[in-house]
Amino acid sequence: MRARVEVPRNTLTQAPVVTAASGLRYGPAGAGAHPDLPGAVRLAIGRDGGATWPWRAALAGASRDPLSNGVNARIPATAGEYEVAVPIEGVAAGDALTVALVREGSAVGERVTVRAP
């Protein structure tokens, strides 16, 4: 899943940092190693219109190092407009996936649903 985001300055996010440097790839079930923290915003991907968000990624540009993946803490998001790419294995062609920005597990703003190619 690739999503273009525009992140204002002074936004807080949290791990996991999903970049080429992190090498993080999600399986079909997602991962729950980083429970939601108050005030942190992440990109989230789910099924069923976003009833749950098993796949989440920090708002971090491609050059962000993954060192913060070892702790569950709020970190400064990368400000500006950029693409967040989240590798997900086990998604079948035609599956509907919903993407949104989430804060404390709830979508903030628009949800977008797309079909996997």
Image (tube, helix red, strand yellow):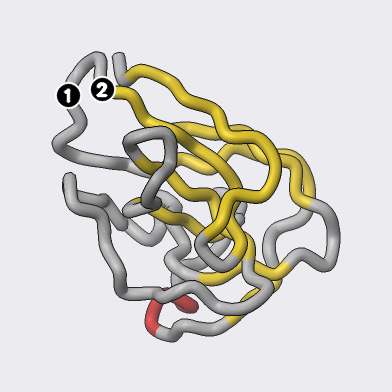
Q: Which residue is at a point 59% across and 37% down the rendered structure image?
A: 83
Q: Which residue is at a point 83% across and 53% down the rendered structure image?
A: 8
Q: Provide residue 102's location: percent of width, then percent of height.
A: 58, 55
Q: Is 86 situated left or right of 3 in this image?
A: left
Q: Is residue 7 visible?
A: yes
Q: Which mark is residue 67?
A: none
Depth order, front residue of 86/67:
86
Mark 2 is on which residue type?
Asp
Q: What SS does tag 1 mark?
A: loop
Q: Is 64 situated left or right of 91 in this image?
A: right
* Residue bearing the label numbered 1: 92
In this rendering, the answer to whether 96 lies above or below 77 is: above
Q: Which residue is at a point 31% across and 56% down the rendered structure image?
A: 23
In this rendering, the answer to whether 36 lies above or below 99 is: below
Q: Provide residue 78's location: percent of width, then percent of height.
A: 70, 58
Asked if labels 1 and 2 touch by Cβ distance under 8 angstroms, the answer is yes
Q: Residue 95 carries which label?
A: 2
Q: Which residue is at a point 61% across and 62% down the rendered structure image?
A: 103
Q: Provide residue 86's location: percent of width, then percent of height.
A: 40, 43
Q: How far apart are marks 2 and 1 (CA)?
A: 6 Å
